[in-house]
Image (tube, rainbow, N blue to C red):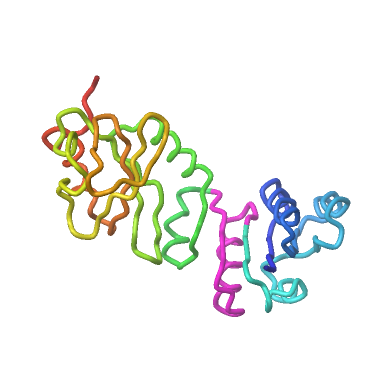
């Protein structure tokens, strides 16, 4: 696999280091000359100096044969442009973009730049996972596949509590794929029992969350204050 990484900040540099350590062929592109010189001392020929938004710089890096292009510069507009050029002009099917400002995340999605990774958004997801406000956490959105993976907490007195997996009433387009209990997870069978306090992972079509939650919260309400 050949990977081009645009941006040799902490993220890009560490990504390049890890991928090289896994025997991947990597070219890291950095537009700041001082930064380039620092990184070049470690990565040597795996780093090139130049602006990755310029076609000749990307072509010099060999974008025509790149299997994956990762744009992690500090500028969201640059990251969008780099990924668009890689995908639309050079036919690179695998792109990953860093989103510096989470308010720009929607712009990446509208332009088809996926996956787009926002560190702020990821940290918020972790906070929601540790302190869920509504008992439901979206773990992963598979945009191109039109699927989501969510986690819900089974509340005492809910419809799902004390039922077998096969008896939990779920809408079409949703499926229980895992149950977390006592710090350990397992893939349930049809006759596996759902217990209060379980964390249930489901894969579903987007938009079904409002039909899922009532099965795991008493009377369809949110989590109790206690």
Q: Quadrant of the C terminus?
A: top left
Residue at (67, 72) in percent of width and height: 66
Q: Residue furthest top?
A: 226
Residue at image coords 43%, 62%: 109
Magenta segment includes 93: yes
Magenta highlight on residue 128: no
Name the quadrant containing residue 194. Answer: top left
Q: Position of residue 108 (x, y in %)?
A: 47, 61
Task: Tell whether 97 sits left or right of 40.
Answer: left
Which quarter of the figure has residue 5?
bottom right
Q: Which residue is found at the position 47% from the left and 54% from the top?
A: 104
Q: Nearer the viewer, residue 48 or 221?
A: 221
**Residues rendered magenta in the picture:** 72-100
In the rendered structure, the answer to whether residue 183 lies left or right of residue 3 reads: left
Residue 10: x and y, percent? 70, 46
Question: Is 225 drawn above or below residue 66 in the view shown?
Answer: above
Horizontal side of 156 relative to 68 (left or right) equals left
Total marks in image: 0
- Location of the N terminus by quadrant is bottom right
Q: Measured along the vertical axis of the image, is residue 42 above or below residue 161?
A: below
Residue at the (61%, 55%) spot, across then down: 75
At which x and y percent is residue 103? 45, 49
Residue 186 position (above or below residue 50): above
> Image quadrant of residue 163?
top left
User: Which percent across, then down, holds residue 60?
Assistant: 77, 74
Left or right: residue 153 versus residue 112 is left
Q: In terms of depth relative to the viewer, which is nearer, 135 or 30?
A: 135
């Amino acid at each position: 696999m050949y990977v081009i990484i645009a941006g040799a900040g902490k993220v890009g540099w560490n990504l390049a280091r890890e991928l090289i350590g896994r025997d991947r062929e990597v070219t890291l592109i950095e537009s700041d000359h001082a930064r380039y010189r620092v990184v070049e001392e470690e990565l040597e020929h795996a780093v090139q100096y130049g602006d990755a938004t310029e076609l000749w710089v990307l072509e010099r890096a060999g974008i025509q044969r790149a299997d994956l292009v990762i744009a992690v510069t500090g500028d969201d507009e640059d990251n969008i442009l780099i990924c668009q050029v890689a995908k639309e002009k050079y036919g690179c099917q695998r792109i990953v973009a860093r989103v510096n400002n989470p308010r720009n995340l929607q712009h990446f999605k509208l332009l088809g730049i996926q996956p787009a990774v926002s560190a702020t958004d990821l940290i918020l997801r972790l906070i929601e996972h540790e302190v869920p406000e509504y008992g439901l956490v979206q773990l992963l959105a598979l945009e191109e596949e039109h699927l989501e993976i969510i986690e819900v907490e089974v509340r005492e007195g809910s419809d799902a509590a004390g039922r077998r997996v096969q008896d939990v009433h779920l809408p079409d387009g949703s499926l229980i794929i895992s149950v977390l209990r006592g710090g350990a997870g397992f893939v349930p069978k049809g006759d596996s029992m759902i217990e209060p306090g379980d964390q249930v992972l489901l894969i579903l079509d987007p938009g079904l969350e409002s039909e899922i939650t009532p099965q795991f919260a008493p009377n369809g309400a949110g989590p109790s204050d206690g």
